[in-house]
Image (cartoon, rainbow, N blue to C red):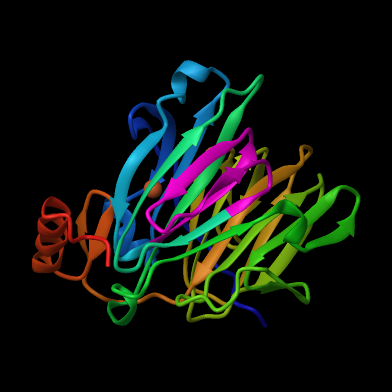
Amino acid sequence: MASIREAVKVLPGQLKMDGAGIKLRRLFSRDEAVLMDPFLMLDHFGSNRPEDYMAGFPMHPHRGIETVTYMLDGHIDHRDSLGNHGTIGPGDVQWMTAGSGILHEEMPRKAEGWMQGIQLWVNLPRSNKMMPPRYREIKKEEIPVYDPGRGSSIKVIAGESQGLVGPVKDLVVDVKYLDVTLHSGVVLEHEIPKDRNAFLYVYEGEMMLGNRMPRKVPAGNVAVLGEGDAMKFAVGRKPVKFMFASAKPLKEPIAWGGSMVMNTKEELEQAYAELKSETFIK
Ligand code: FE2
């Protein structure tokens, strides 16, 4: 019989301004990085008021991590030091492996209604922190959708679910990343291998999560899943929408400095020295 993972923590996050001025809810960050390993940070950014986001994220460096941006509404224009540029819109994904270093900007376009998305940071293992940077843009149409009916859906961004494989392949850290919508009244068990850390972020509606100690997870909260080999959730009268992520932990030391995450303080100092001397980009 499956041992059901309980929600060991429900994190409401904190409202913040980041970049040059972009409103966001930071669900977890460095204080939770060991607990969430290999996931470092999760931001739900955006607003329905352009003054809350138009300043965007101008040119900034990353090293040692991957940033994964998933758009819910509106558009972001981006360009980077690899020469990539483009626009991501609703349902599109940008999977950016900073590796040895990248400089990029992420600038929202003025929207009529909402401009919002979710950015996840995934740590890279020591052996890959200085790998050549890699950049992938995935359009909504490329993401396979499992349709269990009655308005539910599972979009497989990375990893495998329901026999579907996500378009983001050959990942250094084998992340499973799903965007799930479940209609009201669903009760479901879903297998998660024991050796993986997992969380889910409810961005609309609410659910009850767990088995022996079910906890309510309302919109705007991350639920951190404890030990076990499956999760179980029940959806009430309203449908629920959430992101699900799982991966094996790296169990390596974390040295965090702004938008760069290395293993040691010395590696961080080197990164900042290289930025200063303009030798950052390899
Ligand atoms: Fe960035």
**Which region is colored magenta?**
66-93
Residue 44, position as x, y percentages in the image: 49, 40
Q: Is residue 149 or residue 211 the one in the foreground?
A: 149
Coordinates of residue 28 in the picture (x, y in percent): 38, 48
Relative height, residue 109 to residue 174 (above, below): above
Residue at point 58% right, 39% down?
Answer: 218
User: Is residue 71 magenta-colored?
Assistant: yes
**Residue 272's quadrant in the figure?**
bottom left
Residue beneath the point at 66% across and 21% down: 113
In the visual, does 251 lie left or right of 117? Answer: left
Q: Nearer the viewer, residue 126 or 270?
A: 270
Image height of 62 relative to 15, above or below: below
> Which quarter of the rendered picture does the C terminus lie within?
bottom left
Q: Is residue 275 left or right of residue 3?
A: left
146 within the magenta span: no
Image quadrant for the N terminus? Answer: bottom right
Report x, y in % for residue 164.
76, 73
Residue 65 is situated, as x and y percent measured from the top left of the image, at 35, 63
In the image, residue 53 above or below residue 244: above
Secondary structure predominantly adopted by residues drawn in magenta: strand
Image label count: 0
The answer to whether residue 28 is left or right of residue 233 is: left
